[in-house]
Amino acid sequence: MPTSCVIIGGGIAGISAALALTKIGVQCTVYELRVAPSTIGGSINLTPNALRLLEFLDVEVQGCPVDSIEIFSLHTGKLIGELPFKKFGPGLRILREELLRSLLRATDKKGINVVYDSKLIAIKDDSEDSKVTAVFANGKKVEADFILGCDGVHSAVRTQYVESSRKPEYTGVAVAYSIIDGTGIKTHFRSTGFNSGRFGSLITSYFDPDRTQIYVGAVMEIKEENDKQGWRIRENDRQKTMDEIERRYKNSALPCVGELIKEVEDFMFYPVYKLGPGGIWSRGRVLLLGDAAHGMPPQGESTGLAIEDSVLFARVVESNPQTLIEATFKLYEKTRRPRIDTAYKEAVSRWENAKDRSWFFQKVIEWMMWAFLWYKSADFESSMSYDVRIEEIVVEPEVEPLS
């Protein structure tokens, strides 16, 4: 079994992979491009099965418990649907940066080294060498038995080595989000509200245990493609963004929507990218995990999928100790692809529905929402009850053993 791994990317996927592999005895070092842990990204939903995996990885998290996501009409103010978690245990709404801090606390306890300000510039994987090498801009060269690219949808590992032709695609939809003090605001949602309208959706959610802080995220169709990373709206652009959000949501029948928007002082603006379906996940002794492999629009489970990737990959490595790492990658991919392909199609479909639509189409969506959720309930329950720790690993007779 391999004993060492270099992980490129110190986000949720990379840190989760380090924790999962350390658990089976693989020594990991994580290299992150940024000079400090990322604070980009708003509130995320951790499903019950994602929380079980975090517990498995000895990660302690705190946030706002969510027993259901309520869906409201911005036009009528009525509850038009609900996604319940009660049957599977509560979910959790948490800030992305808080989840990352929790993961990093776990790495500290495990003695996993995370090296910042490390820009990957090359990967050298010569079959005659016993190790694969990551080369960084500062001149450092690091060898390991294999490399994991966990560096997101704009992955340097993918574009420089695994599949250079596979570029991120802008979805045409962006999220403008902010955090406000919810003290004294009477909300229409218990924990998390998904507020649907003709000109985009507004996500409103508590994310702290005391339920005093509220995440406000405007999901909007934006034609122009902007910078690939999230950025804080500059002062001279702030009014334009505020005007855009007011135009889309000012006539809501939900009284607190206007109040929540009024409380916003500044927005982070984040254009959403995706990768095309399929793609190559590995080359030689280098494997992609998380968004680097299968970047898709957020769909309520995206964070959980990255954690699942890590836990499943560690299982495949542990269960095939005498197998060449290249063959182990193939076993992982064959095991993992079906669930990812299903999630990808669902995510892309949902994200298309976030774009502007006619009054009539919006009415049809509102009229049919309960029926649609009932129709999809079996798929939802299957996804919520899924446990990657008991997923049957594909075994092929042609897998080549270590000599």
Image (cartoon, rainbow, N blue to C red):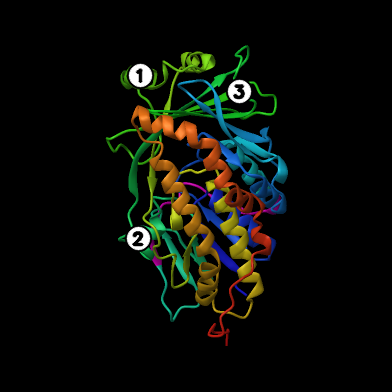
Marker disc for residue 247: 1
Mark 3 to mark 2 CA distance (whole Å) = 41 Å
Amino acid type at circle 1 is Arg
Disc 3 designates what residue? 213
Left or right, 266 with reference to 212? left
Disc 2 designates what residue? 160
* Magenta region, residue range: 109-123
Q: Quadrant of residue 90?
A: top right
The quadrant in which the N terminus is found is bottom right
Q: Is residue 165 above or below residue 402?
A: above
- N-terminal-most mark, 3 or 1: 3
Nearer to us: label 3 or label 1: 1
Is 100 contained in the magenta span? Answer: no
Is 112 contained in the magenta span? Answer: yes
Please tell me whether mark 3 sits on a helix, a strand or a loop: strand
Residue found farthest to the bottom: 403
Residue at 54 percent of width and 15 percent of height: 256
Nearer to us: label 3 or label 2: 3
Amino acid type at circle 3 is Gln
